[in-house]
């Protein structure tokens, strides 16, 4: 280590560089966490929308099946 940094100024400069890099990485991490939370919220909303749509379609399918059964019963009685 003594060979790499012979001057106090070099050590202080390296410390300042590392400190700046550390701050930048912390900021980057904070932005990544914020983006992740936003995407998670968006995914949750989309999942709920899809579940709601699936429920509506299943209800529609049940109604159509009932109509089909009624129509088949009516057709059977006519024959």
Image: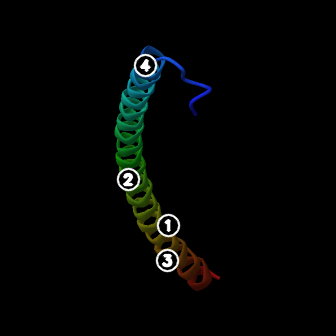
Q: Is residue 26 above or below residue 46?
A: above
Judging from the image, what secondary structure is the residue with disc 2 in? helix
Residue 71 in percent (x, y) is at: 54, 73
Where residue 73 sits, quadrant-wise, is bottom right
Residue at position x 54%, y 20% in the image: 6
How many residues crowd mark 1 within 10 Å: few (<14), some (14–19), many (20+)? few
Would residue 54 be found to the left or right of residue 3 on screen? Answer: left
Question: Which residue position holds label 1?
Answer: 61
Q: Nearer the viewer, mark 3 or mark 2?
A: 2
- Say whether disc 1 or disc 2 marks the residue closer to the N-terminus: 2
Q: Nearer the viewer, mark 1 or mark 4?
A: 4
Q: Earlier in the sequence, mark 3 or mark 1?
A: 1
Image coordinates for residue 76, horizontal then vertical, percent:
61, 83
Q: Which residue is mark 2?
A: 44
User: In the rendered image, which quarter contains the N terminus?
Assistant: top right
Who is closer to the viewer here, 64 or 32?
Answer: 32
Viewer-proximal residue among 68 and 37: 37
Q: Secondary structure at mark 3?
A: helix
- Whether residue 72 sits left or right of residue 20 in the image: it is right
Residue 41, image x and y in percent?
Answer: 34, 47
Q: Could you tell me which residue is drawn at 36 percent across and 28 percent down? A: 23
User: Tag 4 or tag 3, which sits nearer the N-term?
Assistant: 4
């Amino acid at each position: 280590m003594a060979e790499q940094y012979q001057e106090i100024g070099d050590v202080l400069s390296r410390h300042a560089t590392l400190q700046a890099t550390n701050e930048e990485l912390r900021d980057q991490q904070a932005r990544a966490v914020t983006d992740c939370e936003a995407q998670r919220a968006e995914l949750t909303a989309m999942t709920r929308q899809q579940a709601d749509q699936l429920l509506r379609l299943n209800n529609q399918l049940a109604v159509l099946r009932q109509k089909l059964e009624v129509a088949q019963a009516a057709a059977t009685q006519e024959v």
